[in-house]
Image: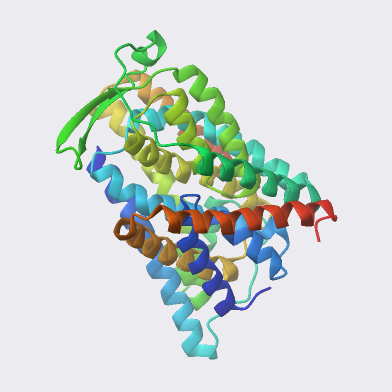
């Protein structure tokens, strides 16, 4: 369990940093400035993912897409950690108490990530 | 909005000072970003997303080293995320002035606790209350300094949980990890060994920050152009700070950084007093 949780967290952070760095450097090479200037209107994480995936599918690769993916991946990291922990307590450890606890955390997070 | 270079530099320094002082990057980042002209709500929103990065980064190592108590963390998370959701919604509704005042007061309170508190010798508990026993709040961790494995059990889970609701509220309200508060609850109320207390707090901070971030994302307060240099800078700065801290082991250095934080706290109170300017 510890190894699994630790690996999820590490990969999430490394992927996020990789995407952010790539986006910033690409912007620097394309425009001569590392800063990206665009804003996000109020959205939720799942909608944010959908928008980014749609852009990926259309092949609209650009620095802002990489930065958005970095942010989305970072936000998914603790969420996936809780999701995997719930599955672990339910199926591997068969611990009802902690399945309910982590399930509650997962439910509240899912609700908050759907907020708009 | 501050330039990319200035934001990156500020974030590296914030991550570094945060790691050296033990108070996290947000307490430096938010005051400095507001000094550079960023509205405090945007500074809080961008800070809390960087908290996910720093806490997940350090928690990944601690969890794999078996220092973190996952059950304690997962039980307490239920309370911190609810607190963070309420706190972040209050931030959206509050005026700048009150946020400056609240930030300065919380910073000064955590600062005094860190400064005054003496390191006490930790002794394992011989008895555990029935609720904590029912929650299976016990564990063992390898203590490298002592060269043996330490067995421990946590106590007063109910009191710890209710206080964690407050720590989560502060984290969501001010966009910080509020690690100092969480460690205090683990140490003083639940009697966890110091190493387990710090590392478990790190695990909880990530999920708590995610709950707060979701509210700020929904209100359009997350600026991606600002988030990129902040996340990269704070990650880099805290990595450097943690490495240097292991080598230095010097209380004087830590006290110097705590002094810097006290100045930041006082100027936030002053700015709040003057109407959030």
For residue B131, what is the image quadrant?
top left
Q: Is residue B229 above or below residue B139?
A: below
Inspect this view and state whether residue B248 appears: yes
Look at the image and tell me in which quarter the N terminus of chain B lies: bottom right
Q: Residue at x 63, y 73 (%)?
A: A38
Number of marks in picture: 0
The residue positioned 53% from the left and 37% from the top of the image is B181
The answer to whether residue A99 is left or right of residue B164 is left
Q: Position of residue B70 (x, y in %)?
A: 33, 33
Residue that protrudes farthest toward the right in the picture: B275
Q: Quadrant of the C terminus of chain B?
A: bottom right
The foreground one among B261 and A62 is B261
Image coords of residue A78 (percent x, y): 42, 46
Q: How is the image coloured?
A: rainbow
Furthest toward the front, the residue is B252
Where in the figure is residue B191, as x and y percent of width and height? 39, 24
In this rendering, would B53 be left or right of B40?
Answer: left
Q: Is residue B89 above or below residue B38?
A: above
Q: Nearer the viewer, residue B185 or B202?
A: B185
In this rendered view, identify the residue nearer to me: A113 or B22.
Answer: B22
Q: Quadrant of residue B224?
A: bottom right
Location of residue B226 in the rendering, given as x and y in whole percent from the top left corner:
59, 69
Q: Nearer the viewer, residue B17 or B226?
A: B17
């Amino acid at each position: 369990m510890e190894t699994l949780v630790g690996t999820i967290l590490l990969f999430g952070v490394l992927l996020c940093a990789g995407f952010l760095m790539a986006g910033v450097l690409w912007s620097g090479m394309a425009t001569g400035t590392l800063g990206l200037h665009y804003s996000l209107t109020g959205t939720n994480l799942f909608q944010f993912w959908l928008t980014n995936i749609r852009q990926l599918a259309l092949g609209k690769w650009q620095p802002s897409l990489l930065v958005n993916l970095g942010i989305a991946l970072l936000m998914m990291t603790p969420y996936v950690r809780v999701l995997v922990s719930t599955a672990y307590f339910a199926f591997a450890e068969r611990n009802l108490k902690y399945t309910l606890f982590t399930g509650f955390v997962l439910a509240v997070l899912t609700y908050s990530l759907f907020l708009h | 909005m501050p330039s990319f270079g200035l934001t990156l530099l500020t974030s590296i320094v914030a991550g570094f000072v945060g790691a050296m002082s033990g108070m996290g990057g947000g307490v430096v980042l938010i005051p400095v970003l507001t000094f550079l002209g960023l509205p405090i709500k945007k500074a809080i929103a961008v800070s809390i997303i960087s908290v996910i990065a720093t806490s997940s980064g350090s928690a990944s190592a601690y969890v794999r080293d078996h220092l973190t108590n996952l059950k304690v963390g997962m039980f307490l998370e239920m309370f911190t995320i609810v607190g963070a959701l309420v706190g972040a919604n209050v931030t959206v509704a509050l005026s700048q002035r009150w946020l400056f005042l609240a930030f300065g007061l919380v910073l000064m309170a955590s600062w005094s606790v860190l400064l005054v508190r003496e390191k006490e010798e930790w002794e394992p508990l011989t008895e555990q209350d029935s609720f904590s026993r029912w929650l299976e709040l016990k564990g063992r961790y390898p203590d490298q300094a002592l060269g043996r494995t330490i067995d421990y059990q946590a106590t007063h889970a109910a009191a710890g949980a209710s206080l964690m609701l407050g720590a989560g509220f502060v984290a969501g309200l001010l966009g910080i990890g509020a690690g100092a508060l969480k460690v205090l609850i683990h140490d003083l109320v639940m009697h966890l060994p110091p190493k387990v207390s710090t590392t478990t707090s790190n695990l909880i901070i990530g999920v708590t920050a995610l709950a707060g971030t979701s509210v700020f994302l929904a209100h359009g307060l997350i600026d991606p152009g600002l988030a990129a240099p902040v996340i990269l800078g704070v990650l880099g700065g805290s990595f450097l700070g943690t490495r240097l801290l292991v080598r230095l082991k010097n209380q004087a250095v830590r006290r110097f950084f705590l002094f810097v934080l006290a100045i930041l706290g006082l100027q936030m109170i002053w700015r709040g007093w003057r109407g959030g300017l």
